[in-house]
Amino acid sequence: MSDASIPWPAVTSNGQARQKTLAADRGEVQPTSLISYASSGHTLIIGESDTVVVAASKLGSVLSCSLLLAPGASTTDFSGTVYHAQVQSISGHLGHFKVLVEQDGENTDLGALSRPGQPFFDLVLDLRDKPAIDSEVLPPGYYAPKAEVLNDAIEEMQTLVGGFEKPKYFVYDPQICAHGRSGLSGCTRCIDACPTKAISSLADTIEVDPYLCQGAGSCSTACPTGAIVYAYPRAKDTLRHIKTMLASYRAAGGANPVLLLHDSEHGAEQVASLAGNIPENILPLMLEEIGSVGMDTWLAALSYGASGVLLLCPDHVPASVSHEMEHQVSIGRTLLQSMDYDENRIQIIKNSFAQKLSNNGLNETGIGAAGFAGMDEKRTTLRLATDHLFAQGNEKPEIVSLPDGAPFGRIMVDKQACTLCMACVSVCPAGALEAGGESPRLGFIEWNCVQCGICESACPEDAITREQRFLFDNDQRMRSRTLNEDQPFQCIKCGKEFATQSVMDKMQSKLKDHWMYQKPDALNRLKMCEDCRIEDMFQAEGGLTDSHRTIQ
């Protein structure tokens, strides 16, 4: 059921404006590629003998079932294949489950024993107290139901024979990913936020299994750089939809619009059941998943003129997704409060839906609508939205401190410890740090910093610390500022610049008491460039010093 098909009340001018708005066409959504599954119904049922036999009897008319029991267990009234082994691991997805078991002290691929030419199970029904896969959202084709919903699972499994398709929900750009650089670990926000365990570390980047991904979207909202974005729909399509809705609502005579975001399954059911009691200034917007939009979308909606944004979060939303939403809300609310906006302009509604939707406390009028277009670059959207909110806010703070884990902030450099080695510059994935070119200088562009911490890990002198904060002045945050600089040190023989004064001072201070540098000539060589140092050593030993001399 779409939001437009729900019989919304239209008693007031707001209700009439909402009715017109929901009936309007929202335009096309950029298509995404498809992920295909194929299942012949080859099913493995794991558990206690009596339970699995009952399940097999219900599934057997449609699916080809094999049973896996613990060693020594017996069963009756089942004419199919029965294996006896301990499960070591199960991995995969609909049409492609690999099951490893222990037999005679070795790991054995059960699928290869079952069908040598096609060594995978299409479906798995795991009825043990502790299933093999424990992700919050199980892979398609894997079922580990509680007893009270076993029949529902069996009924659904019987429909999973044939070919199936789903959208590919993500687009990933490894070039701007802050997961790692040069073997150093950085951002893991997408991995932490994924309820399906579809994302894994792959050296300096990540890898997303499109067959495990089920479109929760929390990875894209958690990503600080926009390296992974939601693809169905894309951010720009969602933002365009929101902007058009709010403009249409205002043009139809509506006032004080509040955007209600909800998912297309459980959330849609809740909205439909409560439609008659939802205030007429609330505009529902159905998303694929509630976790697929984050702070950039919410703040953009406010800057487009929404009085508030309500996020409907039913019980089925995975804890990792809910946690990421709460984290994003805490950052967004901090920004709003600092500009003297009511923090309740962004709210998560988890229970008592009817009461909270009717009494949401959003009595303030919307903000003058911004004109910027929606785009897929989340940090650009965030910058434009916050700039618009800042321009219209009552308070004009220079800086606000943000909660831990926020993707904005600065780094601070201990100038006494920093040697300007530029190790931090070489690993920064976001272009926040830059070398000074001809002069020994470390520059920093605050807006580019995503607080991944790779620079901090790379610094050999432990000279870098981080601070989560938001700098409101756009010119300051976009401009390069100097964190540290020094005078170049010139070779005492040829005058070539090859180090900094502070590096030379530290090197001489550390080595002056070393036995190898007790002679003045040896200590002086530290002050020479590489070429002059080698030449001086040869000269001291009576060897070759230039192209006109021969080796003695």
Image (cartoon, rainbow, N blue to C red):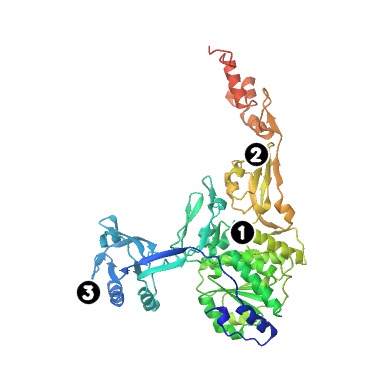
Between the C-alphas of marks 1 and 3, the distance is 60 Å
Question: Crowding near pointer 3: few (<14 within 10 Å), some, many (20+)?
Answer: few
| Residue labelled with disc 3 | 76
At numbered mark 1, what does the secondary structure look like: helix, strand or loop? loop
Kindly report which numbered mark, 2 or 1, lies closer to the viewer in this rendering: 1
Whichever of labels 1 and 3 marks the residue nearer the N terminus, that label is: 3
**In contact (CB < 8 Å): disc 1 and disc 3:** no
Q: Residue at x 46, y 64 (%)?
A: 34
| Residue labelled with disc 2 | 420
Q: Amino acid at mark 1?
A: Glu
Between the C-alphas of marks 3 and 2, the distance is 75 Å
Q: Quadrant of residue 125?
A: bottom left
Q: Amino acid at mark 3?
A: Thr
Whichever of labels 2 and 1 marks the residue nearer the N terminus, that label is: 1
Q: Is residue 420 above or below residue 152?
A: above
Q: Is residue 19 above or below residue 219?
A: below
Residue 178 location in percent, x, y?
A: 56, 52
Residue 400 location in percent, x, y?
A: 71, 59
**Camera-side residue of 222 and 96:** 96
Residue 104 circle label: none
| Residue labelled with disc 1 | 377
Q: Residue at x 22, y 75 (%)?
A: 77
Q: Amino acid at mark 2?
A: Leu
